[in-house]
Structure formats: structure tokens, C-alpha cells
Image (cartoon, helix red, strand yellow):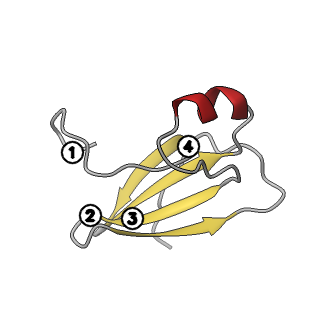
Amino acid sequence: MSGSHKPITKFSGFVRGMCKHENYWLVGQSEDMYVTDRMAMAEDAVLLNSGVYIYDDEFNASFFYTTPGIMNIHCLTTFRA
């Protein structure tokens, strides 16, 4: 999402929720339950586990934080303590 129809990056899993916090995009990913369907469409390897991408669009770099034991992520939010 960039305010236009032009994608800013591509992730290789089942992306669900997204929010922006300061300079970073937080992008949730659920476990992929439709592996055979995704494999037919995939250009690259498909990431199957759930977690959160922390993406910096200025540097086009991301870190994937896995969430073992959590199958589905539906939305993300940030808060200030």
C-alpha cells in the first residue's frame, strides 16, 4: 500500500494484516493452508509459517518474526505505553 496502485514490495506468504509505525510497516502473515494452490501461482518459494514482517520501505529491507503456535493473524495495531 503506497497511496497509489504501485506495489512497494512483495511478500511470499499469506499476508493478512498491515499497519504503519513510524518508519516501519508491520505486515501480518497467517500459516498458508492452501499450499497446492499457492505453489501453482508462485514464482519463488512460498513461506508457509505465520509471523510478522517488519518492513522498512526506505531501505527496502524486512525482518520476519515467526509466531510459533499461532496459525492465523488477522490484523495488527500499534499502541503507545
Seen at 19% across and 32% down, the residue is 5
54 left or right of 45 in image: left
Q: Pointer 4: residues within 10 angstroms few (<14), some, or many (20+)? A: some
Residue marked by disc 1: 2
Secondary structure at numbered mark 2: loop
Amino acid type of the residue that numbered disc 4 sits on in the rendered structure: Cys
Q: Pointer 2: residues within 10 angstroms few (<14), some, or many (20+)? A: some
Q: Pointer 1: residues within 10 angstroms few (<14), some, or many (20+)? A: few
Residue marked by disc 3: 55
Secondary structure at numbered mark 1: loop
Amino acid type of the residue that numbered disc 3 sits on in the rendered structure: Tyr
Residue marked by disc 2: 57
35 left or right of 52 in image: right
Mark 3–mark 2 distance (CA, rounded to whole Å): 6 Å
Amino acid type of the residue that numbered disc 2 sits on in the rendered structure: Asp
The mark that comes first in sequence, 1 or 4, is 1
Mark 3–mark 1 distance (CA, rounded to whole Å): 13 Å
Seen at 51% across and 48% down, the residue is 12
Judged by depth in the image, the label closer to the viewer, 3 or 4, is 3
The mark that comes first in sequence, 3 or 4, is 3
The mark that comes first in sequence, 3 or 1, is 1
Contact, mark 3 vs mark 2 (Cβ under 8 Å): yes
39 left or right of 2 in image: right
